Amino acid sequence: MTQPQTQAVQPKVTYTKGDMVLFRDVERFWLGKPSHTFVGRVERSWRHADTGKVLYDLVELSGNRHCVGIDPDFMRLLPPADAMRDIDAAPLSEPDTGAMTPAAVAGLRQHLAQGAAALPAQR
């Protein structure tokens, strides 16, 4: 007896200008070519005249390359919370700043450079 095969189904997401996304160029991926996946920023969305499907224009962040007509099926949102997790969870009570990630140290330096007299309150 054959088992039915199931695939993970991604929920439909609407992206807005400024969203950070992970994009996979599916043709490059299936052909085994390099640089098939990159981080991009959404610049605009538009509806294809023939298919009616919403497509997106992105800017590849590592090279400032513009990519147009991107199918959202090959994009995934990069939530801000994931990018900021190391700063939010920095061990502020640690006397050794080496225990903190570079991003956490940079965040604390920026906070102190803005004229704040004290560190942010712990939660």
Image (cartoon, rainbow, N blue to C red):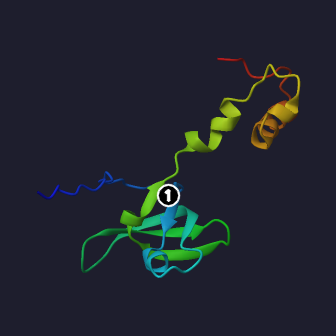
Q: x and y percent of residue 116 in the render?
A: 83, 25
Whether residue 114 is visible:
no
Total label count?
1
Res 87 quadrant in image: top right
Q: Residue at x 54, y 80 (%)?
A: 33
The front one of 48 and 107 is: 107
Q: Is residue 99 left or right of residue 123?
A: right
Kind of element beneath mark 1: loop
Indicate the quadrant containing the N terminus: top left, top right, bottom left or bottom right.
bottom left
Q: For the view shown, which residue lies furthest in the left direction?
A: 1
Q: x and y percent of residue 96 in the render?
A: 88, 27
Res 86 quadrant in image: top right
**Above or below — where is 122 with respect to 1?**
above
Indicate the quadrant containing the C terminus: top left, top right, bottom left or bottom right.
top right
Q: Residue at x 17, y 56 (%)?
A: 4
Q: Is residue 73 left or right of residue 6?
A: right
Q: Is residue 102 left or right of residue 11?
A: right
Amino acid type of the residue tagged 1 in the rendering: Lys
Q: For the view shown, which residue lies furthest in the front direction?
A: 1
Res 119 quadrant in image: top right
Q: Residue at x 81, y 32 (%)?
A: 99
Q: x and y percent of residue 72 in the render?
A: 38, 64
Q: x and y percent of residue 17 in the render?
A: 49, 58
**Above or below — where is 41 with respect to 96?**
below
Judging by the rendered image, the residue that carries numbered circle 1 is 17
The front one of 8 and 49 is: 8
**Above or below — where is 91 with respect to 113?**
above
Label 1 crowding class (10 Å Cα cut-off): few <14, some 14-19, many 20+? few
